[in-house]
Structures are given as C-alpha cells and as structure tokens.
Image: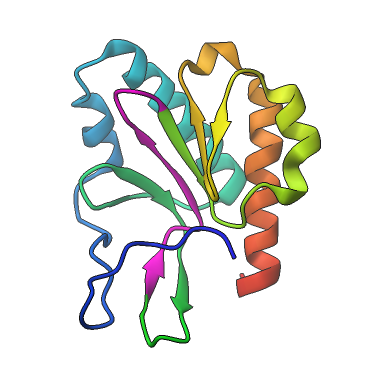
Amino acid sequence: MGLKPRAKKTGTDAKTKPTSVSAASFINGLADERRRRESATLLDLMSEVTGEPPVMWGAGIVGFGSYHYKYASGREGDWPRTGFSPRKQSLTIYCVPGFAAQRDLLARLGPHKTSVSCLYINKLDDVDLGVLRKIVERSVDQMARTYGD
C-alpha cells in the first residue's frame, strides 16, 4: 500500500532519515522566492492538520509524524506520515495511502499529477488550498487507522 520508501539493497535501514536541520532554516534557504512562500504555506497547513512539528527527512523532505514499515522481504524503517518536498520542477506532497479514495477531491483540486503516493503541483496558487487540506486530512486519517496514532 502507498509509498515504498527507497531502502538500501542490503540491510534494513532506509537511506532517508530524520535530521537535526530545522524545517524553517531549510525553507528560508530555498533560492526561489515562490517556493519559499509555497513551502511556508504547506508547513502551516500540514502542521495544523497533523498537530505534529515539521522534521527534515534527508536533505529535502519536510515530514510530519512518522510510522514504521516492514516488508515481507525483511526491509523495514520509518517514514513521515505526510510531508512535502519543494523541488524545482514541482512541489511534491507525500500522501502515503495513495489516492484511490481521493478521486472526488483530486477532480476539484486544480492542475496536478499523481504517482502512487505523490501529488505533484507546479504552482500552489493554481490549486484550491481547501481541497488540498482535505486531501492531506484524509491521508493522515487513513494513516492513523492503519498504523495507529
């Protein structure tokens, strides 16, 4: 189900882990002014929805909460319950459960693309933030039902 974090081919530890870098300093260090503004908006939205503080995962993912996964292969690790990455091409929003139960909201969101567990938005101003908030809420609620609080 959902996002399959990249793991090392040997061992059980995922490469992307929480760091001590503050999300605010990461966002303030973004070169693109629009991405800084969009990231600040997502930081506020996800903080409100999750009630969790933002944590940097690796060099470019702002995550909220975490869960432990374990595959039949023996690979296991931790990953944010939700989060985002302000990439140059688009904002990537992580909705681990995927989008099968989100089709109604995606139809109203505005311009976007999806993969299994990632929502890609070129410009945050082009989408309905209320709808985006509901997408994140549903994703977080489904994670709570699946993995507990």
Asked whether 101 or 79 is in front, the reply is 101
Residue 50 in the image: state x and y as whole percent. Answer: 57, 50
Residue 40 in the image: state x and y as whole percent. Answer: 40, 26
Residue 143 in the image: state x and y as whole percent. Answer: 62, 63
Asked whether 115 or 27 is in front, the reply is 115
Residue at image location 67% in from the left, 45% down from the top: 137
Q: Can you see residue 101?
A: yes
Compared with 88, 72 (above or below) is below
Q: Is residue 122 left or right of residue 26?
A: right
Q: Is residue 76 left or right of residue 132?
A: left
Give the extent of the magenta segment: 77-90
Residue at image location 38% in from the left, 87% down from the top: 74
Q: How is the image coloured?
A: rainbow
Q: Is residue 83 rendered magenta in the image? A: yes
| Quadrant of the drawing holding the N terminus | bottom right
- Residue 15, by quadrant, is bottom left
Q: Can you see residue 148?
A: no
